[in-house]
Image: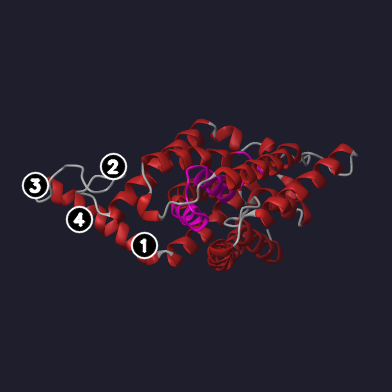
């Protein structure tokens, strides 16, 4: 990887990780266009996962106060129970959360619960995820269109009434299982989780905010795991460009978070749905007529 490739991939990752249009789809095209590692799927997968650490950093910076409040409240509330300073009972929260847990501590539990499905699936299908089929354009195109249609249905049937303080276990389960779709290329982690949030009755901005917080464990774990493996499979001269790419993805990712949250306060996800449908249809047409190859030969 050279520095031009690094900057391009960083920009693409930062733009598409949080906007629900599939970072994998765009990174696959970016890696093809820049001829990254001559199309080696394992090296490309490792590179993408490491670059994602930049977007994790963006989430940490953007939601620094939320993360601090969640962490401190989680420790404080559970320590209170262990020292018997807080009673373990339910009341006054409509059954959404135990009363002995503050809203911030409860959100910590929801992030933990919502992260379990993708953690289990990610470990179970690790070899498949790192294989060449994760770069297959047929799969990417179908998932671009499929998730777009599901997101459209979610927009129509979702009640869009829940704020962050009204989230319960059902929200964590629905959004957590929706996040598993992100393991399929073209689905989009943010697109899948926002879709799940809308189906669970969350407001658009609430769904996006919970989506971003839920991304921290999954993307951090994937990035750190691949970072360890990257030392063994990536060329030594690629590590400085990889660092540059990670920094670029973090800066662009921060701006993307700000944009999407501001956008969803007043707008639906229609523009992203239309974009996904057009891009997926174009890719299918190009594949059908043989203009594009589904998977690059190494």
Residue ID at (78%, 50%):
278
Q: Earlier in the sequence, mark 3 or mark 2?
A: 3
Residue ID at (39%, 65%):
64
Q: Secondary structure at mark 4?
A: helix
Q: Secondary structure at mark 2?
A: loop
Picture disc at residue 95: 2
Q: Earlier in the sequence, mark 1 or mark 4?
A: 1
Q: Are marks 1 and 2 in contact (CB under 8 Å)?
A: no
Q: Number of numbered discs present? A: 4
Instruction: Give the magenta range.
Output: 184-213
Residue ID at (17%, 42%):
89
Cα–Cα span, label 4 and label 3: 12 Å
Identify the residue position indicated by label 3 in the image. Answer: 84
**Image quadrant in which you'd find residue 263:** bottom right
Q: Are marks 1 and 4 in contact (CB under 8 Å)?
A: no
Identify the residue position indicated by label 4 in the image. Answer: 76
Residue 206 placed where, x, y %? 46, 55
Q: Earlier in the sequence, mark 2 or mark 4?
A: 4
Residue 263 visible, this angle: yes
Cα–Cα span, label 2 and label 4: 21 Å
Residue toward you, 22 or 39: 22
Residue 31 visible, this angle: no
Identify the residue position indicated by label 1 in the image. Answer: 66
Residue 190 placed where, x, y %? 56, 51
Q: Are marks 3 and 2 in contact (CB under 8 Å)?
A: no
């Amino acid at each position: 990887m050279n520095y031009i490739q690094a900057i391009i991939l960083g920009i693409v990752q930062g733009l598409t990780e949080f906007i629900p249009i599939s970072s994998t789809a765009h990174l696959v095209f970016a890696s093809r266009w820049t001829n990254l590692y001559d199309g080696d799927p394992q090296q490309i997968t490792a590179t993408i996962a490491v670059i994602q650490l930049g977007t994790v950093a963006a989430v940490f910076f953007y939601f620094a106060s939320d993360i601090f409040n969640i962490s401190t409240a989680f420790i404080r509330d559970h320590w209170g129970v262990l020292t018997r300073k807080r009673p373990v009972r339910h009341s006054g929260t409509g059954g959404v959360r135990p009363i002995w847990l503050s809203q911030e501590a409860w959100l910590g539990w929801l992030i933990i619960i919502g992260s379990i499905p993708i953690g289990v699936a990610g470990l179970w299908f690790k070899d498949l995820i790192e294989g060449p089929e994760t770069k297959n354009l047929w799969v990417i195109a179908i998932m671009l269109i499929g998730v777009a249609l599901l997101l459209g249905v979610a927009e129509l049937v979702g009640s869009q009434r829940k704020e962050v303080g009204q989230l319960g276990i059902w929200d964590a389960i629905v959004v957590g299982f929706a996040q598993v779709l992100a393991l399929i290329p073209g689905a989009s982690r943010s697109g899948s989780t926002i879709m799940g949030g809308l189906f669970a009755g969350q407001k658009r901005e609430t769904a996006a905010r919970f989506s971003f917080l839920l991304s921290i464990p999954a993307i951090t774990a994937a990035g750190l795991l691949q970072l360890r493996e990257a030392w063994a499979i990536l060329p030594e001269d690629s590590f400085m460009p990889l660092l540059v790419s990670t920094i670029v993805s973090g800066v662009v990712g921060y701006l993307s978070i700000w944009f999407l949250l501001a956008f969803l306060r007043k707008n639906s996800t229609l523009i992203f749905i239309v974009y996904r449908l057009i891009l997926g249809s174009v890719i299918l047409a190009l594949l059908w007529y043989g203009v594009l190859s589904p998977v690059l030969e190494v």
